[in-house]
Amino acid sequence: MTYATTAQVKAALALGVSDTTDDAQIAAALAAAEQMVEGYCGRSFTVAGTAATARVYATPAADLVFIDDCTAITLVETDPSADDSWDGGPWTSSDWQAEPLNGLSGGRSVPYDCVRAVGDYYFPPANRACVRVTATWGWAAVPDAVEQATIQTAIRLWKRLDTPLGFGGGPDTGLLYVSRQIDGDVAQLLQPYRKGTMAVGGIA
């Protein structure tokens, strides 16, 4: 998980590369910023590797299962008898459909985050994991908006060390309250990537 680098944060702060005085605190602020971005969006933006692995899911719907973000899906299996036999099928690529369609939502390239049953089989609605999906998990690349939001949040957290009691200002401005709400620009950058806001089944 690396959405931005310490060097990028320092460049935004106009700090020289050779000035390493605050590197440890900036790195800590950057790590916390990445966690805040993930918490706000309800998802990770980790870049996908090359190996496909299996993950299991439960779904209340017979025709749709929501999954973690992935760049490619290679296998869909079900366990209708709920005995870990995974004997529902075999599913072929024509039995399921990865969505959003075309890997696009709102004109943006996004990973797949759900699978729809479109052939001869259905997902067994259950409270336990009866769907198994083998995929390459993660994003193709960290979105530019996520990178910028992470940098801005890291800077804000780092600067926040100067106002530990929540107030700042000086002789010219007087005492000022430092807002604890998410920065408006950061919220606008991240809004399209919040879990549940990307259009399911979006068509290019």
Image (cartoon, helix red, strand yellow):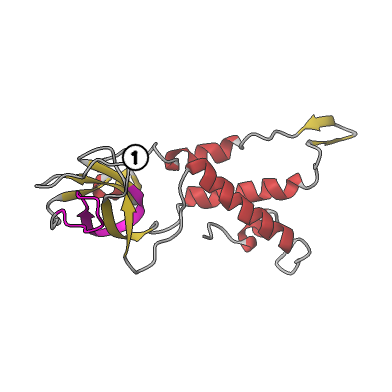
Q: Where is residue 187 in the image (x, y as percent from the top left)?
A: 54, 37
Helix, strand or loop at label 1? It is loop
**Residue drawn at x 25%, y 38% as measured from the top left:** 61
Question: Is 113 left, or right, of 123 in this rendering?
Answer: right
In magenta segment, residue 181: no
Q: Position of residue 174 (x, y in %)?
A: 86, 30
Q: Where is residue 97 in the image (x, y as percent from the top left)?
A: 19, 48
Question: Is 34 left, or right, of 144 in this rendering?
Answer: right
Residue at the far left: name it: 120
How many marks the image carries: the answer is 1
Residue at the far front: name it: 83
Question: Is 122 left, or right, of 52 in this rendering?
Answer: left
Other-residue count near label 1 (Cα within 10 Å), few / some / many at <14 / 14–19 / ≥20: few
Q: Which of 44 and 6 is in front in this view?
A: 44
Q: Where is residue 14 in the image (x, y as percent from the top left)?
A: 70, 56
Which quadrant holds residue 54? bottom left
Q: Can residue 141 be seen in this view?
A: yes
Image quarter where the C terminus lies is top left
Q: Which of 146 and 194 is in front in this view?
A: 194
Name the kind of residue labelled 1 in the image: Gly
**Residue drawn at x 21%, y 57% as measured from the top left:** 86
Which quadrant holds residue 24? bottom right
Q: Is residue 187 above or below residue 88?
A: above
Residue at the far right: name it: 171
Residue carrying label 1: 106
Q: What stretch is highlighted in magenta?
A: 67-88
Q: Is residue 110 visible?
A: no
**Residue drawn at x 78%, y 36% as measured from the top left:** 166
Which quadrant holds residue 64? top left
Q: Which of 141 and 172 is in front in this view?
A: 141
